[in-house]
Amino acid sequence: MSDIQVIDLGKAYKTYPSQWARLAEWLIPYSKPRHSLKWVLKDINFSLRPGEALGIVGMNGAGKSTLLKILTGTTKATTGELSTTGRVAALLELGMGFHPDFSGRQNVYMAGQLLGLSMEEINRLMPSIEAFAEIGEYMDQPLRTYSSGMQMRLAFSVATAQRPDILIVDEALSVGDSYFQHKSFDRIRQFRKEGTTLLIVSHDRQSIQSVCDRAILLDKGKLITEGLPEEVMDYYGAMMAEREQHTIRQERLDNGKVRTISGTGEASIHSVSLLDERNKATEVIEVGSPVTLEVHVDINHDIPRLVLGFMIKDRMGQAIYGINTHRLNRELVNLKAGEKIIYRYAFPANIGKGHYSIALSLSRLDSHIDTNYEWRDFALVFHVINSTQPDFVGTAWLDSNLTIQRT
């Protein structure tokens, strides 16, 4: 079993005004310091119980990779305490520790020994490593002939040849084909069931929400927020949209969910409702029934262009369907303060039974990252039931028609 304790962790690098200042500090050790400290991590605190999975998110330069390097021991922290137990396997940089002139098989032996495996263990594991990597005859070819995806296959296969107590994965899994990414995440999920503690850095919302129990958000070396993956990813999305001191706030709803609202406020959502086929507001709908999403919008300042988008998410926060007026070529232009707009999206509820939420976006262009007037998660929560259609599994109702021919 394994756990991780991080207490007041910090990492700083020395910066010097010139090379001469660096040399003088080295030659005159008892003189005044000639450097300043640049903190890339500061006051990081979190703990991870055995078998838990933690997602680490943040913009480039937030300190994510530095944190992982400290956790794996490749970089030493400047301040704070770190406690880990169990065998650690890490995928930080693609092919780290591999030599381009050696064959894949030779690199497996070198990387395996760096992970603490004996030659006997590597020999025993080699067939399963080859089978999982699926690179065929390239196993005995020089690594320099590999594509980045093939290197990823080999690196992941070696790092996970034996179930580690702690698995640390950086953005490495974003490289390669989708088939191997699915295969890799299946192995990660299996390790989790068997008790492996997981830390994963990814910008992929689905990866974080489908694999992790919790997530933390780093920004400029500090831990901004920690919580359920969906709540943290919502805040991260809002933070990415905040480029001009837009407001970000979070509200806790009656059902315990945390709603994130952000934007400039130049346009705002006044009300939102889901209407059934009788044009009545409802929170419970039948599979396949026609519904209309009605959104009332207030224009608070003159704006050149307005796009409304909505996204349906399941109870795990996974995106089910999303569309906006930009993609439908129905954007509005030259809006004046005081105008009120009513949008109505009509669609059949061809989704499976369960709980769903709707996120809304008011923006200038296709994405709320560019001029976000308002982004609102959990703008509406509804429930889908199935009392009229054959019972089925999944989030999409395809209404399949069956024909059978027997001879």
Image (cartoon, helix red, strand yellow):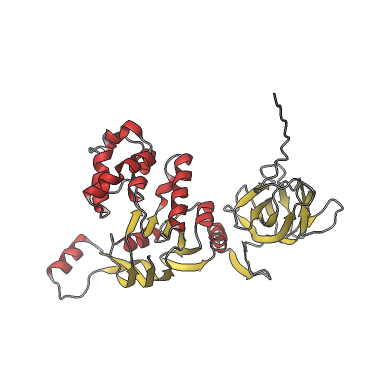
Across and down, in percent, residue 255 comes to 67, 68
Please determine whether, in this image, residue 14 is positioned above or below residue 60. below
Query: What's the residue at 44%, 52% (across, down)?
Result: 188
Query: Residue 222 in the image: x percent, y percent?
Result: 43, 68
Q: Quadrant of the C terminus?
A: top right
Farthest residue, direction top: 407
User: Closest to the observer: 158 or 330?
Assistant: 158
Work out which quarter of the rendered image holds the N terminus and state it.
bottom left
Q: Is residue 298 above or below residue 97?
A: below
Give the tally of numbered discs: 0
Name the quadrant containing residue 157.
top left
Which one is in front, 252 or 4? 4
Residue at 15%, 76% (x, y): give it: 30
- The extreme front residue here reads 407
Kindly tell me whether residue 224 is visible in this rendering: yes
Which x, y percent locates residue 102? 23, 38
Q: Which residue is located at x 30 percent, y 33 percent?
A: 145
Does residue 59 appear in the picture of this structure? no
Q: Position of residue 154 (x, y in %)?
A: 34, 42
